Image (cartoon, rainbow, N blue to C red):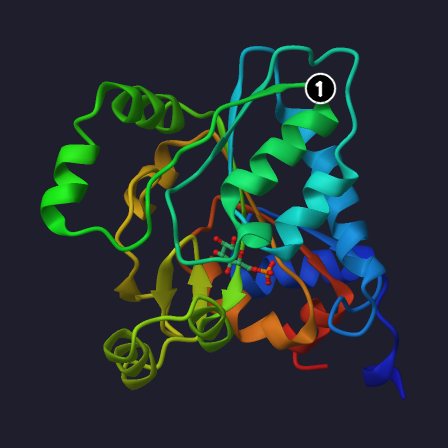
Amino acid sequence: DVMREVLGLKDLEAAIKQKLHIEKAIVVAGDSDLSPWVKKEMGRACVTCMKKRLKNGDIVAVTGGTTMAAVAEMMTPDAKLNDLLFVPARGGLGENVENQANTICAKMAEKALGNYRLLHVPDHLSREAYESLIEEPAVKEMLELIKSCRMVVHGIGDAITMAERRKTRKEDMEKIKARHAVAEAFGYYFNEKGEVVHKVKTVGIQLEDLPHVEHVIAVAGGASKAKAIQAYMKRAPHSILITDEGAAKALLGE
Ligand code: BG6
């Protein structure tokens, strides 16, 4: 049956680009929902993609999550890149330590033999505390560094999975469900059309900042994330997508 002809990875990349109206997609073999090593393959592809675009003096902002942890794990030093600074993209989003951007950022810098700076902002601050904290010179300086990044690397999650993992408050959980959120990326929740339906309030990179960042790389795979990837990428046509065969095939309805 011609229709069931197996698509090669390059064909999948071309098909994904066309389907999502994005400029660049990289697809690795396998499905990370089923095989844990596939996440590492996405990590490896992401590291290659990062190194191609980075130059000395660059600031790289990263998010947390298990996929970004795989990117950090696969990071290696590069003889030509000896002056990189890694920072977390945003402040606390309610994740456990192992999934936090600070943790991933430090690990990635260590593997790249680069430098890192961390951002310490508690998750659930009162408005007053929040406003005085962002006026603190050390925090202010850090936020300026983050905003001057030349690259952002982030994960994309299924909305409900992420809301549950982050122990989201009941009111917010209800809002996320009522507004049919399907995707989550750096604390923003999106519906199928790619519209923001909820946002975790924190400092650092905001969605509006992304168009001004030279290189934005989204890394997400697994058939279970197909809907989330499709929804989020509507907001990010200039981002590079690194995904896997599982997500790509689910996205194409194979
Ligand atoms: C988080 C990102 O760090 O990783 C989120 O900030 C994303 O935007 C999440 O949804 C995905 O996590 P994982 O573990 O599925 O890679």
Q: Position of residue 85 (x, y in %)?
A: 54, 20
Q: Is residue 176 above or below residue 79?
A: below
Q: Secondary structure at mark 1?
A: loop
Q: Is residue 130 visible?
A: yes
Residue type for callout 1: Leu
Q: Nearer the viewer, residue 203 or 122?
A: 122
Q: Is residue 4 above or below residue 127?
A: below
- Left or right: 93 as drawn, with respect to 243: left
Q: Vertically, is 3 above or below 74?
A: below
Residue at the bottom extreme? Answer: 1
Instruction: Identify which residue, 47 or 107, lies in the foreground.
Output: 107
Report x, y in % for residue 50.
66, 32
Q: Nearer the viewer, residue 107 or 75?
A: 107
Residue in the image at 54% along x and 62% along y:
20
| CB at disc 1 and ligand 1 closer than 8 Å | no
Quadrant containing the C terminus is bottom right
Q: Position of residue 28 (x, y in %)?
A: 79, 56
Can residue 216 be seen at all in this image of the molecule? no
Q: Between residues 105 and 224, which one lies in front from this camera angle?
A: 105
Q: Quadrant of the N terminus?
A: bottom right
Quadrant in the rendering for residue 131: top left
Count of numbered labels shown in the rendering: 1
Give the class, few, some or many, for how many residues have Cα within 10 Å of label 1's Cα (few <14, many ≥20): some
- Identity of the residue drawn at 51% across and 39% down: 102
The residue where tag 1 is placed is: 113
Where residue 220 appears, as percent x and y from the top left, is 62, 58
Residue at 38 percent of width and 56 percent of height: 187
